[in-house]
Image: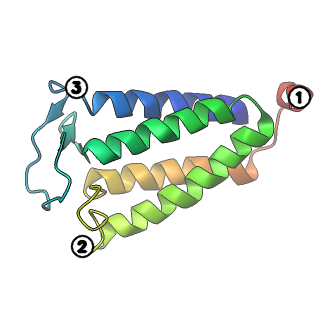
Amino acid sequence: MIRKFALVFGVLYVISGVLGFVPGVTQPPHNAPPLVVDAFHGRILGLFTVNILHNFVHLAIGLWGILGSRSLAGARGFGRGLAVFYGLLAILGLIPATNTLFGLVPIHDHDVWLHAGSALIAAYFGFLAKADETETATA
């Protein structure tokens, strides 16, 4: 299950990174703090605020998850890293002075709960989940 988690999350993040570049999916932001980097600034599905840097981060995390899913150690490392990184982003997204990472990447509004939820799920698979027999046999 740990390797499947890394693969599924990896694919989901690649998809979200790609969707951030699709004009029909990304709608103009409303009531959003200003950004220094405003290329592709919008809300995916009208909810999750992104910009070009945010999209590239999603693509990188997705590739990390897909590559990490090839081994148990890689998948567990992905879960641990994602838990720490997204936990930190969730906290920073709650603070007005840092909720755009100093104007570079929007991490506010619905992104906060998405990052927090991702961090909790990743923490389970990165730190707590027991590997099943198929994962330990191929690791």
Q: Quadrant of residue 71?
A: top right
- Type of amino acid at the residue the image marks with label 1: Glu
**Quadrant in the picture for residue 50:** top left
Report how far apart the C-alphas of labels 3 and 2 lie in the structure: 28 Å
CB contact under 8 Å: marks 2 and 1:
no
Q: Residue 96 bears which disc, if any? A: 2
Badge nearest the viewer, 2 or 1: 2
User: Image check: 26 left or right of 138?
Assistant: left
Q: On the picture, is 119 further left or further right than 26?
A: right
Q: Which residue is mark 1?
A: 133
Image color mode:
rainbow
Q: Mark 3 vs mark 1: which is more N-terminal?
A: 3
SS state under label 2: loop
Sequence order check, earlier mark of 3 and 2: 3
Quadrant where the C terminus lies?
Answer: top right
State the residue in front, 132 or 18. Answer: 18
Dot 3 and dot 1 residues touching (CB under 8 Å): no
Residue nearest the viewer, comparing 14 with 108:
14
Q: Position of residue 87 (x, y in %)?
A: 50, 61
User: Which element is circle 3 on?
Assistant: loop
- What residue is disc 3 on? 22
